[in-house]
Image: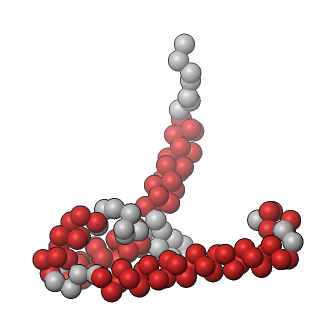
Amino acid sequence: MQAWQKLENDHKSALAHYVKGIISDRSESAKKDADDFPDDVGVFATHMTKCFLSPVYDTKTRWKIVKKMLVFLEYDSVEQNTLHDFARDDDGDFRSLNSIRNDYAHKTLVRLSKTNTMRESA
């Protein structure tokens, strides 16, 4: 971060304090969400139907939920491992769907550009 290098030390300190406040607010919000989370199966099902594919759950959390359901269903372990490997990067960290899509799109563009040219229409 080039801007960081230009900050005075008191501004760096103020920024660190500001970011800590943001993290604390998020932590408190997450604690409240956990406390309010439905235990009842019917309420939980309604919640998941409404919220699973929304910003309430990030890609990593969705993946963990789907993986746990597959475990409960005793889904074939070979297929589980295939999905598991697909969702992780070379360092073993979960990849977001955007990074998987971008990786695929860039590889595809490189491959296509070898045999195809993009021409502007006349």
Q: Nearer the viewer, residue 94 or 81?
A: 94
Residue sitting at the far top? 122
Q: Quadrant of residue 5?
A: bottom right
Q: Position of residue 112 (x, y in %)?
A: 51, 40
Classify residue 74 as left or right of residue 52: left
In the depicted structure, whether residue 118 falls above or below residue 73: above
Residue at x 63% of width, y 80% of height: 20
Q: Position of residue 61 (x, y in %)?
A: 38, 74
Residue at x 14% of width, y 81% of height: 41
In the depicted structure, whether residue 28 falls above or below residue 3: below
Residue at x 79% of width, y 75% of height: 12
Classify residue 37 as left or right of residue 7: left
- Quadrant including the C terminus: top right
Q: Position of residue 39 (x, y in %)?
A: 21, 85
Q: Position of residue 108 (x, y in %)?
A: 50, 47
Classify residue 34 as left or right of residue 92: left
Q: Nearer the viewer, residue 31 or 98?
A: 31
Residue at x 55% of width, y 28% of height: 118
Q: Nearer the viewer, residue 48 or 90?
A: 48
- Quadrant including the N terminus: bottom right
